[in-house]
Image: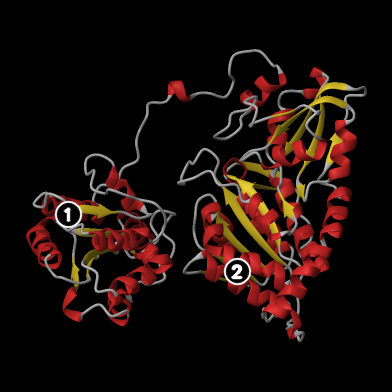
C-alpha cells in the first residue's frame, strides 16, 4: 500500500497502465500529477509544454503512434486545449489517450468555477469522475482500456479536494508500455469536411455503446434502503463521500453513486422509481441535475443546486450535503472562524515588487494610465500595497487588452505579463500589436521559472529577446533591466522613454524567483 495524494494516485495509475508520455502545462490543482511522473518514472517521456493545446496535440500524436499517453491540465486549461480536444473525438485514437482535467470549485486558485464534465459531454466521449484516491488509481487502467476499445479519448475529471488530499492506495502490477505501431489508416486522421462528416456520424453511432458501458460500469452502483425511500440521492464523484459521511442508511436514504458518464439513464430511472424525491449531489455546476430533470420529467421532484437545497456556488461539504438530507446539528467542518485571514502577497525580495514600484511611480505621472495584468504571481500586484493593475482576465489577455485600449485612444496602455504566460498565450497578441503598430508598452517580467505553480521550467527562458525581435519588435525597443531598488532610476527612465514611443515596446525586467533561488542555494550547500 502507498499513502498518496489524489494527484499522485492518478499519476501512479497512469504509469502502471503503461503510458509512454505525459504532457501538461502546470496549473493548480493538476500540477502534482506530472511532477510525480517526472520524479518517479524516468522511462515515461515528459516535459512541460508551452500550453494546454500543444500538450493535447502532442499526446494525440503519441496515440497516433500506437502508445498510451496522458495529458493533464486544470479546468481553465480545457478552454485552451478545446480545439484539439473536441476534434480528437472526431479523429478517434490509436493508442489509449486520457485527458485529466482538475477542476477547482470555490476558486481556491482560479478565476472561475468551470465544470469540465461539460467538455466531455460536448465532445461526446466517456467521462470518469472518481470519488476516492483508490478509484482515481483504478480508473486509470480502465480508462486506457476503454479508450483503446472504443477508439476514443477519455476524460477524467477530479476536483481540488480529491487532488490534494491523501489516502492509502492498493497498487496493482504494472503493465509494460505499448509497442510502436503508428496508425496506417489516413481515412480518419485527415479532417477534410467529407471525412469529418463520416467520422462525426460514426461518433454519434458510438453513443449507444458508451451508454451500455456506463450502465454496466462498476463505478455506477446503488445502495437501496430496503423500501421505497422518501428521499434518494444521486451522488457524483467526490460528493458520494460527503453523502456517506452523513450515514444515509440510518436516515433511510437510498444512494446511487455515479462516477462514469454518459449518465446511465435506465439505472437512474430504476433508482428513481424506488424514491419519492431525488437529490442530486455534484461538486461543480448542476450538469447532472439538469439532465436528470429532463430524463424523469417535470412531474418527478428533483432537487439540488438549482432548487437551492444545495449551495449554487462553491464546493460541497459534508455539512451542506447533510443539511440537504435533513441532518440537524452544529457545523462540523467550518473552522474558518478560528483562522485569521491572511491575504496572499508577493514574496519579500521578489523582482515583481520592484517592477510595480517603478510602474506605479511612472503611471502616477499620467492622468489616464492603464495597466493590464495577467495570470501569475504578479497578479498579486492588484492587492495592497501596490494596487497596480486594472484588469486580469485570462492568460495572455494583458497584451491584447492593452492593444484594444490603445486602439480606443487610451494612453499609456501598459501590459504586464510573466515569462511563462507570455509563451503560453502572449506571443500571438504581441504579433497582432506589432502588425498594427499599436502604441503599447509591454512589461515582460521574467523570473526564469513558472513560479506560481511551484517553479517548473519556463518554456522561453533565455529566448525572450529573440522571440520579441522575431515577432517584429524594433531592436531598440526591446529593453532589459534588473529589477532591484538600486536600479529604480534606470528602470523608471526606460519606462518613460518607451511609453512615449509611438509603437510597440517590450521591457524585460529579469531576476530569478526568490523561491527557486533559495532552493538552488540550499541544494548547492547540501552538495
Q: Residue 454, image x and y in percent?
A: 43, 55
Question: Horizontal placement of 347 versus 501: left or right?
Answer: right
Residue situated furthest right in the rendering: 226
Residue situated furthest top in the rendering: 329
Quadrant of the rendered structure where residue 74 is? Answer: bottom right
Closer-to-camera residue (132/63): 63
Figure disc tally:
2
What's the residue at 80%, 62% (across, down)?
146
Q: Residues within 10 Å of mark 1 (few under 14, many from 20)?
A: many
Q: Earlier in the sequence, mark 1 or mark 2?
A: 2
Q: Residue 144, image x and y in percent?
A: 76, 63
Q: Which residue is mark 1?
A: 359
Asked which secondary structure carries label 1, the reply is helix
What's the residue at 86%, 54% (across, down)?
213
Residue 348 higher or lower than 303, as above or below: below
Question: Horizontal placement of 389 versus 233: left or right?
Answer: left
Marker disc for residue 66 = none
Q: Which residue is mark 2?
A: 84
Closer-to-camera residue (137/311): 311
The reply to whether residue 285 is visible in this rendering is: yes
Mark 1 vs mark 2, foreground winner is 2
Closer-to-camera residue (153/4): 153
Closer-to-camera residue (436/508): 436
Distance (Cα) linking label 1 and label 2: 38 Å
Amino acid at each position: 500500500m502507498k499513502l498518496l495524494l489524489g494527484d499522485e494516485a492518478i499519476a501512479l495509475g497512469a504509469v502502471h497502465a503503461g503510458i509512454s508520455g505525459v504532457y501538461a502545462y502546470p496549473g493548480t490543482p493538476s500540477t502534482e500529477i506530472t511532477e510525480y511522473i517526472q520524479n518517479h518514472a524516468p522511462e515515461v517521456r515528459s516535459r512541460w509544454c508551452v500550453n494546454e493545446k500543444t500538450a493535447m496535440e502532442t499526446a494525440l500524436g503519441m496515440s497516433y503512434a500506437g502508445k498510451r499517453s496522458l495529458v493533464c491540465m486544470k479546468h481553465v486549461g480545457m478552454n485552451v486545449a478545446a480545439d484539439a480536444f473536441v476534434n480528437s473525438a472526431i479523429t478517434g485514437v490509436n493508442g489509449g489517450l486520457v485527458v485529466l482535467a482538475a477542476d477547482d470549485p470555490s476558486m481556491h486558485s482560479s478565476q472561475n468555477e468551470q465544470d469540465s464534465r461539460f467538455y466531455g459531454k460536448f465532445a461526446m466521449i466517456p467521462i470518469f469522475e472518481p470519488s476516492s484516491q483508490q478509484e482515481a488509481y483504478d480508473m486509470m487502467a480502465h480508462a486506457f482500456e476503454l479508450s483503446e476499445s472504443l477508439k476514443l479519448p477519455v476524460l477524467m475529471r477530479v476536483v481540488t479536494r480529491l487532488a490534494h488530499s491523501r489516502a492509502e492506495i492498493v497498487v496493482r502490477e504494472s503493465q509494460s508500455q505499448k509497442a510502436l505501431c503508428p496508425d496506417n489508416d489516413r481515412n480518419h486522421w485527415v479532417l477534410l469536411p467529407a471525412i469529418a462528416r463520416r467520422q462525426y456520424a460514426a461518433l454519434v453511432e458510438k453513443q449507444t455503446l458508451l451508454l451500455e458501458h456506463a450502465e454496466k460500469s462498476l463505478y455506477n452502483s446503488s445502495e437501496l434502503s430496503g423500501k421505497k425511500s422518501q428521499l434518494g440521492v444521486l451522488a457524483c464523484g467526490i460528493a458520494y463521500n460527503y453523502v456517506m459521511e452523513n450515514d444515509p442508511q440510518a436516515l433511510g436514504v437510498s444512494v446511487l453513486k455515479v462516477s462514469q458518464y454518459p449518465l446511465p439513464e435506465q439505472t437512474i430511472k430504476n433508482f428513481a422509481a424506488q424514491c419519492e424525491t431525488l437529490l442530486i449531489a455534484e461538486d461543480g455546476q448542476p450538469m447532472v441535475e439538469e439532465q436528470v430533470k429532463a430524463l424523469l420529467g417535470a412531474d418527478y421532484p428533483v432537487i439540488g443546486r438549482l432548487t437551492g437545497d444545495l449551495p449554487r456556488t462553491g464546493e460541497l461539504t459534508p455539512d451542506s450535503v447533510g443539511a440537504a438530507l435533513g441532518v440537524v446539528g452544529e457545523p462540523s467542518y467550518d473552522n474558518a472562524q478560528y483562522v485569521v485571514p491572511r491575504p496572499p502577497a508577493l514574496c519579500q525580495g521578489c523582482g515583481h515588487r520592484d517592477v510595480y514600484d517603478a510602474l506605479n511611480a511612472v503611471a502616477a505621472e499620467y492622468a489616464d494610465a492603464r495597466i493590464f495584468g495577467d495570470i501569475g504571481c504578479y497578479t498579486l500586484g492588484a492587492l495592497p500595497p501596490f494596487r497596480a493593475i486594472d484588469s486580469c482576465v485570462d492568460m495572455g489577455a494583458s497584451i491584447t487588452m492593452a492593444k484594444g485600449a490603445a486602439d480606443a485612444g487610451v494612453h499609456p496602455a501598459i501590459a504586464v505579463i510573466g515569462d511563462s504566460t507570455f509563451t503560453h498565450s502572449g506571443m500571438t497578441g504581441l504579433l497582432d500589436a506589432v502588425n498594427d503598430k499599436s502604441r503599447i508598452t509591454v512589461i515582460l517580467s521574467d523570473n526564469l521559472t513558472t513560479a506560481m505553480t511551484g517553479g517548473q521550467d519556463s518554456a522561453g527562458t533565455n529566448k525572450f529577446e529573440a522571440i520579441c525581435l522575431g515577432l517584429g519588435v524594433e531592436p531598440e525597443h526591446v529593453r532589459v533591466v534588473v529589477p532591484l531598488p538600486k536600479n529604480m532610476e534606470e528602470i523608471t527612465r526606460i519606462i518613460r522613454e518607451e511609453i512615449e514611443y509611438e509603437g510597440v515596446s517590450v521591457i524585460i525586467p529579469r531576476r530569478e524567483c526568490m523561491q527557486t533561488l533559495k532552493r538552488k542555494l540550499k541544494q548547492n550547500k547540501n552538495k
